[in-house]
Image (tube, rainbow, N blue to C red):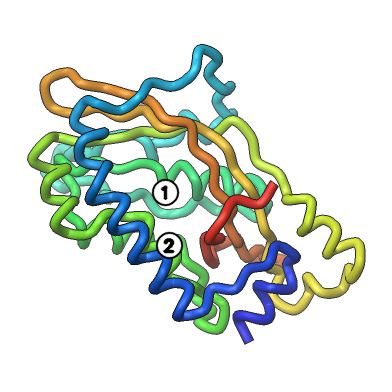
């Protein structure tokens, strides 16, 4: 079962329906209480020492605003996943995708649809609720659009959490059941909005990514807490 498989990666991952409801409710309260004010110009700036951008990932078109081709067709709101078979590299790319948005040109539905393309097709493991919860609800998204909110992201580093590495040491064969890896990613988002406002925020996240041999990696879930 998916729950047992995610628990087996060694970071106490238990995305039960009840836990997701509680986390979702808290997230909505926090977002509605503070995100709009922060994103409209009251957010704090990042520290004096910015992390080094990750090669290739920070330069990815994932962070670019959608443009129109000569034929007038808009590029995808959320670029699809690149063919990556390394879990650390895929987690870095996934974090950039999750932290990047452009409410000026992308609808709420388009943002979710683009993110969905990164998910594993194996429904026994995919935890879509934990991923889509990263996106503000439609009401808040409309406010972000009104304010011209958009963000790009860079990644400074990615690593396997210590608990995950210990779990692999204790049972090396366990990974072969679903080939799901836990990866913690750290980076930064650069935010901007109408009127020249801008801000920066350090970010970190722990992802579950699936990288079966001979197959491109896909996103499985987002942990309810960051694993060191």
Q: Quadrant of residue 34?
A: top left
Q: Residue furthest top?
A: 48
Which residue, given by chain and number where applicable, does mark 2 sit on? 131
Crowd around label 1: few <14 · some 14–19 · many ≥20 (10 Å): some
Give the x, y percent position of residue 192. 25, 27
Q: Position of residue 2 (x, y in %)?
A: 60, 81
Q: What secondary structure is found at the residue carrying circle 2?
A: helix
Q: Can you give x and y, in whole percent of width and height, for residue 223 in the image? A: 56, 60
Q: Does 77 appear above or below 151?
A: below
Residue drawn at 63 percent across, 47 percent down = 184
78 vs 198, nearest the viewer:
198
212 displayed left or right of 82: right
Question: Is any atom of residue 116 visible in this view?
Answer: no
> What whole-number distance in Å separates the C-alpha atoms at marks 2 and 1?
8 Å
Say few, some or many: other residues with alpha carbon within 10 Å of mark 2 (under 14 / 14 to 19 / 20 or more): many
- Residue at 45% x, 61% y is 118
* For residue 161, above or below residue 66: below
Identify the residue at horizontal 55%, vertical 14% (top origin): 49
Residue at image position (18%, 51%) is 141
Sequence-earlier tag: 2 or 1: 1
* Residue furthest to the right: 170
Q: Which mark is residue 71?
A: none
Q: Quadrant of residue 190?
A: top left
Q: Nearer the viewer, residue 212 or 162?
A: 162
What element does badge 1 sit on? helix
190 is higher (above) or lower (below) than 184: above
Would residue 16 be found to the left or right of residue 106 on screen?
right
Instruction: Name the outermost residue toward the bottom.
Output: 1
Give the x, y percent position of residue 144: 17, 42
Query: Marks 2 and 1: CB-CB under 8 Å?
Result: yes
- Give the residue pinned by disc 1: 98
């Amino acid at each position: 079962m998916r729950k047992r498989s995610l628990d087996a990666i060694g970071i106490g991952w238990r995305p039960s329906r009840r836990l997701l409801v509680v986390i979702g409710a808290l997230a909505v309260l926090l977002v509605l209480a503070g995100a709009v004010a922060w994103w409209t110009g009251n957010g704090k700036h990042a520290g004096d020492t910015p992390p080094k951008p990750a090669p290739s990932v920070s330069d990815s078109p994932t962070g670019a605003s959608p443009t129109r081709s000569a034929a007038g067709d808009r590029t995808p709101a959320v670029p699809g996943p690149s063919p990556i078979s390394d879990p650390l590299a895929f987690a870095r790319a996934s974090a950039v995708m999750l932290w990047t948005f452009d409410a000026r040109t992308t609808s709420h539905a388009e943002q979710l649809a683009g993110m969905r393309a990164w998910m594993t097709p194996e429904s026994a493991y995919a935890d879509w609720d934990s991923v889509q919860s990263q996106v503000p609800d439609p009401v808040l998204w409309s406010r972000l659009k009104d304010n011209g909110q958009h963000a790009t992201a860079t990644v400074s580093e990615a690593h396997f959490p210590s608990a995950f590495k210990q779990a692999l040491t204790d049972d090396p064969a366990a990974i072969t059941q679903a080939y799901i890896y836990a990866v913690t990613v750290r980076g930064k988002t650069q935010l901007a909005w109408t009127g020249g406002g801008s801000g920066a925020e350090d970010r970190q996240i722990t992802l579950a990514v699936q990288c079966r041999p001979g197959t491109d990696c896909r996103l499985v879930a987002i942990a309810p807490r960051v694993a060191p």
